[in-house]
Amino acid sequence: MKRLFAVALGILTAIGGFVDIGDIVANTETGARFGMSLAWVVVVGVVGICLFAEMAGRVATVSKRATFDLVRERLGARVALVNLVASLFITFLTLAAEIGGVALAIELATSVNYLLWVPIVAFCVWLVIWRVKFDLMENVFGLLGLALVVTAVALWRLDPDWGGLLHGATHPAVPQGEGHPSWWYFAIALLGAAMTPYEVFFFSSGAVEEGWSRADLVTNRLNVYIGFPLGGLLSLSLMAGATLFLEPRGIQPGHLSQVALPTALTLGKLGLAVLLVGFFAATFGAALETGLSCGYTIAQYFGFQWGKFVRPADAPRFHLVALVSIVLGAGLVLTTLDPITVTEYSIVLSAAALPLTYFPILVVANDPDYMGDKVNSRFSNALGSVYLLLLLVVAVATIPLMVLTKAGS
Amino acid sequence: MRRSWMALFLLLLGACTGPVRSTSVYESKAGATAETVASAVETARLAVQAAQDGDAYGRYLTQLLADAEKDADAAQGTFEGIQPPDRRADQLRDQLDELLGQATDTLTELRTLARRGRFAELAEPAAPLAGLAEELHAFAEAHA
């Protein structure tokens, strides 16, 4: 019974924790502009994150070391440094976007300018990282993030033409008046949002934090293979809501307030209140994960003591990196750079850096010295290799498409 | 050798030249501006609808209207900063300016009422928004 509860809790937190500001922005913008024609990218992204998160979790469980910890040892300091710099930059940008996202969510509830909330949010993120236990932190924000299920409820309540939505999703075509480059650019943004590198750092480091053993490998698989796809459904709900409400009216959602419109108009005040809680939890939870991930990557590369499983006094450099990242992230948002714009750039640049994150995981997950009998199966390797090829193409295409489409504008 | 240096010089000279100011580029910028402002107007229409139906909290509606106004103001400001290259562009500018002015004035009025908590009074000033949105969409389509 206790094990069943642990599995259920893990799946629920995986669903609630799947969506962050990147998913919220990318899926709504895409739905409003291209309808459901890019829904297939969400599916590709979810399969990819399931594949590599499972690998990262397995590596951490079997070796008792987080993925990044092994990258330097397995690939050498120089290659790992390139990986570190790129990943850290993307994770930092994501952290700034999440802090901005929390502030924007509070702004919607209070109508007080988000910039005033940024320092308070940053302080709270740091305080939770410093004081709250890992599993409590993960469970509370993961479960609260489930409030985003309200977007799926709104869609169901709306009783749309399901056949039409499905047709749009299964017959991808560039809508009239839009160019192929923009369509592909948004496809990359969606992929970057679904496969953000920090998710893997956090997942594998979390496995070490929670002291997973081989007996937990089944839990790992269930969390990933059930929780993430259900989280992906929330992304698709956001896209469908935008397709039904915003696209026909030509609304280009550049604000969180516009993202909430489909739910508010369908479910009223209660739905809106639940959605705002969901926005807050999803972005705050992701801010914690990205803040911790900045600390994880640096500490694991340089071999510092890391983690929340030891007292902060025993891992001072890890906590210092997390603190400095949070302060700098808040500073970036306080320059008045629009948090939604920061989000847009963070997900697209993260798509460009994806091979740097996922290649080492595939290498380590195949190394019998670390994995023993738990190396990748042939199927995982074949699928992993196909994904790496895809991510390589995406990485090469991202910057030219960004320039060509003026960042999708 | 000399020819290759000359080619390189011309290439660099070309790179130093500023962006081409043609009517077609100006027209496409006008179309994009109309599209952005139409988006803001449509957002405001939904906000007013939500207020009338009691579907949203006052603070959320205020923020939604403030965001719509900000978008429209920003688009108008950017467009006004662009120099029309010829007479045809002047006409285009005059035509769009009128629509932009109406849109931003209405959005400002709606935001002001919302900030004062007078949500019941939003419907009246919002009445022209439907027609305005239609005109902006038509303009954007004609000058895409």
Image (cartoon, coloured by chain):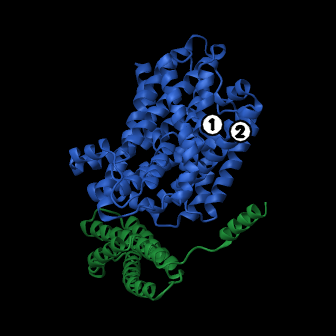
Chain colours: A blue, B green
Q: Nearer the viewer, residue A201 or A134?
A: A201
Q: Nearer the viewer, residue B32 or A190?
A: B32
Q: Which residue is mark 1?
A: A356
The three-letter amino acid code for the residue at tag 2 is: Val
Q: Residue at 69% of width from left, 47% of height from top?
A: A323
**Is residue A33 at all visible to an observer of this figure?**
yes
- In three-dimensional space, the C-alpha distance between marks 1 and 2, rounded to whole angstroms, equals 8 Å
| Residue A396, image x, y percentages | 58, 44
Where residue A135 sits, quadrant-wise, is top right
Residue B50 falls left or right of residue A351: left
Q: Residue at 59% of width from left, 19% of height from top?
A: A366
Q: Which mark is residue A88?
A: none
Quarter of the figure that contains the N terminus of chain A:
top left
Dot 1 or dot 2: first in sequence order is 2
Where residue A363 sits, quadrant-wise, is top right
Where residue A236 sits, quadrant-wise, is top left
The chain holding disc 2 is A
Q: Residue at 66% of width from left, 59% of height from top?
A: A331
